[in-house]
């Protein structure tokens, strides 16, 4: 018979922010907190931007064409978190092919990130020719340490 | 060290809500932080590993539908993906075409001419609310 634990909050005993979980292979362990996505968002990036669904975010700002700021509710501990993106063209521009979304940089892809902070990230979506484009329904997922 | 042996976790007040203490002082949601689906497959639509994926449909060259075992509650889940190019393809990109509660459809395109192609490896993951 399966053992079911009913609980509202999980906190590590030795270290509050660290709980070990046995992996699928039954021998190696992993870390519960480190394995959780700490924030994610699905949004409409065209016209009047709008959040579709999200975790741990407070707002979405439309700075310019294809230029968005996602603000986190409970901050990350540092700016070294990992952020994965996905974007797609809207129907009007689908012939321009797949689009790329990345951290907003000072000068193209080699520039230093301008606004990746523990509180927010600013990203830009460009088509393959490098022109800024509004993405139809981008996704973004954050992994890292919460503050 | 304190070890708890358990097969399943269920929220006590609300079955679908368990709070987890984060690395610092903030808390987060166990259910909301879990990836609900991920999949790694070859361009031949052969799944090498996955979670909560029932099947892959090969719609056309560079065009796949990933079908879930357990559906999402809505189509607003967050999806990201990446790929490994074939020999001879300078650069490619995997994009989301459509999202449904029980599947999503992707395309892999060459960046030089937007031509669809079957990448060697496709990887995707999604976070959101399960039904």
Image: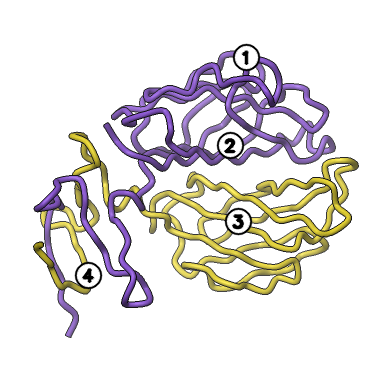
Chain colours: A purple, B yellow
On residue B104, which mark appears? 3
The picture quadrant where one finds residue A38 is top left
Residue at which label 4 appears? B8
Q: Which residue is mark 2?
A: A138
- Mark 4 crowdedness (10 Å alpha carbons): few <14, some 14-19, many ≥20: few
Q: Residue at x 43, y 33 (%)?
A: A80
- Tell me residue B83's x, y (percent): 68, 54
B111 or B1: nearer the viewer: B1
Front in this rendered view, residue A13 or B71 = A13
A114 or B68, which is in the foreground? A114
Q: Residues within 10 Å of mark 2 (few under 14, many from 20)?
A: many
Quarter of the image where the N terminus of chain A is located: bottom left
Between the C-alphas of marks 4 and 1, the distance is: 46 Å
- The mark found on residue A64 in the picture is 1
Q: Check whether the beta carbons of the residues at disc 3 and disc 1 lie within 8 A of each other.
A: no
Q: Quadrant of the C terminus of chain A?
A: top left
């Amino acid at each position: 018979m399966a053992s079911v634990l009913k609980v509202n909050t999980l906190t590590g005993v030795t270290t509050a922010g660290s709980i070990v979980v046995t992996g699928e292979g039954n021998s190696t362990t992993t870390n519960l907190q480190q394995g959780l996505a700490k924030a994610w968002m699905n949004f409409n990036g065209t016209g009047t931007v709008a959040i579709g669904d999200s975790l741990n975010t407070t707002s979405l700002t439309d700075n310019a064409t294809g230029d968005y700021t996602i603000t986190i509710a409970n901050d990350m501990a540092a700016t070294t978190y990992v952020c994965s993106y996905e974007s797609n063209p809207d129907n009007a521009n689908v012939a321009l092919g797949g689009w790329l979304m990345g951290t907003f940089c000072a000068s193209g892809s080699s520039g230093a990130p301008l606004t990746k902070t523990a509180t927010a990230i600013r990203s830009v979506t460009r088509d393959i020719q490098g022109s800024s484009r509004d993405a139809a329904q981008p996704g973004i997922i954050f992994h890292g340490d919460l503050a | 060290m304190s070890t708890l042996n358990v097969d399943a976790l269920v929220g006590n007040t609300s079955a679908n809500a368990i709070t987890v203490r984060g690395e610092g002082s903030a808390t987060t949601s166990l259910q909301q932080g879990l990836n609900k689906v991920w999949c790694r497959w070859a361009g031949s639509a052969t799944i090498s590993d996955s979670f909560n994926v029932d099947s892959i449909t090969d719609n056309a060259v560079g065009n796949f539908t990933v079908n879930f075992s357990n559906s999402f509650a809505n189509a607003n889940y967050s999806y990201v993906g990446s790929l490994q190019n074939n020999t001879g393809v300078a650069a490619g990109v995997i994009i989301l075409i459509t999202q449904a509660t029980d599947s999503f459809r992707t395309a892999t395109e060459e960046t030089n001419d937007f031509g669809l192609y079957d990448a060697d490896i496709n990887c995707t993951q999604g976070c959101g609310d399960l039904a």
